[in-house]
Image (cartoon, rainbow, N blue to C red):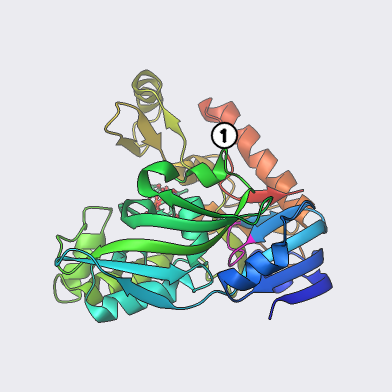
Amino acid sequence: MVKQLSDYPLIKHNTFGIEATAREFVEFGSEEELVAFLGDGFKGKALVIGGGSNLLFVNDFNGTVFHSAIKGMELLPCADDDILLRVGSGVNWDELVAYTVEQGWYGLENLSAIPGEVGASAVQNVGAYGVEAGELIEIVEAISIGTAEKRVFTHDECRFSYRYSIFKDEEKRKNIITHVTYRLKKSAPFKLSYGNLNEKVQELGGETLGNVRKAVCDIRESKLPNPYRIGSAGSFFMNPVVDSTVAAGLLERYPSMPQYPLPCGDVKLSAGWMIEQCGWKATPHEHVGVYSRQALVVVNLGGAKGQDVLDFAKDVVSSVKEKFGVVLSMEVNVIE
Ligand code: EPU
């Protein structure tokens, strides 16, 4: 049965802990239920949410919020060395990662302990410790909001890149993702080259799926606030990418600036480092600040309204622009 509620409080559906309401909230447990609800297509104002770990509500949402409660996982037939796992969009992301690690399936372990749900992994192309979910996504199944028709997107059609997919671009807000199929491996080389991950894995006794998961969980716990205790949406900004000439100029002025050259020749900069250099760890606004151990994470210090967070974020962007000449883009999806 579709759950349909009016004037629904969204505080439990956004990890920032912002008080906002949805005029209507619709939760469905299967593709069939969703299609039946949409009828000939939904023409009103719609917003699809997952775990709410990347959302900032600035106002009440004067429309319909859709949330998938499609659970379950099934194995699809595929080549011997691979695992094709079709997962309901409402499955908790870290439950999926934990399950695949327990089964001895390789691929998702570096993405441990990320809040959120499976559907959003495809929209966001969530990434951490040298792996992006999109690398492992084979197929995304969705229902078109406007027509209620089924749509199937192949890996290539999703056009994944850093924190980007087609669902943030021309397919933005047009679909409700119902299932995501991941291609995992029965054996694989680990990816341990990011930061101190390898060191942590060796301290735990060496390379096993369980140790990689544990190391990632430990690193995240030491650097990032637990969104269920401190309101935040993880990284608030994206790491900016600049061309190599700009990067070289910045390195001359700031020799300790972390820089990550990309295969295309451009250079990814660390937004967290720049925000820290602008002094924001020491200068919060009244209800909003950055996390003491990771300046890329904007935190709700208690009682923040969405507008407070947005005003703070704008001040952060201005300061980074002024000091480094680099414009930060928000990773968080601002709902105004
Ligand atoms: N740094 C600072 N000060 C800070 C934060 C970072 O100096 O306050 C420096 C670090 O010392 C390091 C560099 O900046 O040299 C990069 O920091 P880190 O390894 O913590 O990663 P990040 O680039 O800040 C990205 C993702 C995170 C992900 C980590 C690990 C984005 C927007 N964020 O952060 O993703 O966990 O890498 O892969 O790409 C998220 O999306 O919510 C998220 C947490």
> Disc 1 designates what residue?
320
Between 239 and 41, the one nearer to me in the picture? 41
Q: Which residues are magenta?
A: 49-54
Q: Is residue 316 left or right of residue 152?
A: right
Q: Is residue 320 left or right of residue 253?
A: right
Residue drawn at 36 percent across, 56 percent down: 137
Q: Can you give x and y, in whole percent of width and height, for residue 25 in the image?
A: 76, 69
Q: Quadrant of residue 183?
A: bottom left
User: Going 29% across and 26% down the picture, which residue do you hit?
Assistant: 265
Q: Determine the residue positioned at 58% across, 29% down.
A: 321
Residue 237 lies in the magenta-colored region: no
Amino acid type assigned to the residue bearing label 1 in the image = Val
Q: Is residue 8 above or below residue 298?
A: below
User: Dot 1: few (<14), some (14–19), or many (≥20) neighbours within 10 Å?
Assistant: some
Quarter of the image for residue 279 reads top right
Question: In what element is the residue under mark 1?
Answer: helix
Res 107 visible: no
